[in-house]
């Protein structure tokens, strides 16, 4: 078979453009394709909601790839076991209620299952601003990560969504955009981002699901960003809370999208 270089380029360009146009208006736009963001997307798409995830980096998975200190194993507790079982990740019981999973298998399986359910993931795209309409988040302002890194003066594009989820991890980037643009407006006890505390797995896991909720009209927070917003500890390489947080946000959004 003779291959045509230009035809290959056309196929990539046309198919990407069609996807991008299709997902410029969605039910939920998620910022960050870490474990909590992908779990949120998976459970929303499972219920036939139109979901897009924008990931700044080349790869998805956030910090899960590296496990603990580059030992690519992760731990989940009993409560989170059903989520990984549902998507087909192998688990080994290390001690009672402590389960170990391969980090590479977990990330690759989760991303595959989310995409196959209908979630569209765009990597190498950064969120530089949000759309605010009538004191409510109504979408995202996007640019290529390469443009951001090179500090080029290139105007962004926008996408519209009914809801936005900040799952950007420790940095809680979307929440910080709201603070920068709107002042002390977050739904925390001070109106500000309280900042994550030092690592304490037990307490971090205890609070993360409760912290996974709406933090500004139209904006929800999931994963480590939730504890960063509400001032709870980080939890290190136990990922059950991250998965449960993503599922919780999906459940809350499904109620709102009825």
Image (spheres, rainbow, N blue to C red):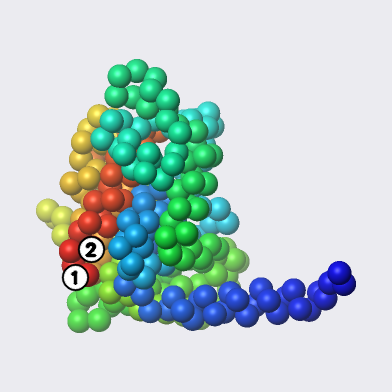
Taking the image as shown, residue 196 lies to the left or right of residue 168, namely left
Which residue lies under the disc numbered 2?
254
As rendered, which of 234 and 50 lies closer to the eye?
50
The quadrant holding residue 162 is bottom left
The furthest residue to the top: 95
Tag 2 secondary structure: helix
Quadrant into which the C terminus falls: bottom left
Which residue lies under the disc numbered 1?
258
The residue at 45%/53% (across/down) is 113
- Above or below residue 15? Residue 99 is above
The quadrant holding residue 42 is bottom left
Disc 2 to disc 1: CB gap under 8 Å = yes
Taking the image as shown, residue 15 lies to the left or right of residue 63, namely right
The quadrant holding residue 166 is bottom left
Q: Marks 2 and 1, how far apart in space?
A: 6 Å
Within 10 Å of the Cα at label 1, are there few (<14), some (14-19), or many (20+) other Cα atoms? few
Q: Position of residue 185 (x, y in %)?
A: 18, 65
Q: Position of residue 67 (x, y in %)?
A: 48, 34
Q: Position of residue 60 (x, y in %)?
A: 51, 52
The residue at 30%/63% (across/down) is 47
The answer to whether residue 225 is seen in the rendering is no
Quadrant into which the N terminus falls: bottom right
């Amino acid at each position: 078979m003779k291959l045509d270089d230009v035809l290959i380029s056309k196929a990539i360009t046309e198919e990407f453009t069609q996807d991008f146009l299709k997902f410029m208006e969605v039910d939920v736009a998620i910022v960050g394709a870490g474990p909590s963001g992908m779990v949120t997307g998976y459970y929303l798409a499972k219920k036939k909601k139109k979901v897009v995830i924008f990931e700044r980096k080349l790869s998805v998975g956030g910090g899960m790839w590296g496990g603990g200190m580059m030992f690519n194993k992760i731990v989940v507790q009993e409560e989170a076991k059903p989520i990984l079982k549902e998507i087909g990740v192998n688990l080994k019981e290390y001690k009672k209620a402590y389960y170990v999973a391969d980090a590479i298998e977990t990330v690759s399986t989760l991303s595959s299952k989310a995409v196959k359910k209908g979630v569209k993931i765009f990597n190498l795209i950064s969120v530089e601003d949000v759309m605010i309409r009538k004191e409510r988040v109504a979408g995202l302002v996007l640019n290529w990560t390469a443009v951001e890194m090179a500090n080029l003066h290139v105007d962004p594009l926008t996408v519209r969504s009914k809801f936005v989820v900040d799952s950007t991890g420790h940095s809680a980037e979307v929440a910080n955009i709201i603070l920068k643009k709107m002042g002390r407006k977050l739904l925390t006890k001070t109106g500000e981002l309280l900042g994550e505390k030092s690592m304490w797995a037990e307490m971090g896991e205890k609070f993360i699901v409760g912290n996974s909720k709406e933090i500004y009209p139209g904006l929800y927070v999931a994963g480590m960003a939730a504890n960063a917003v509400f001032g709870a500890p980080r939890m290190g390489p136990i990922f059950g809370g991250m998965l449960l947080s993503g599922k919780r946000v999906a459940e809350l959004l499904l109620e709102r999208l009825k």
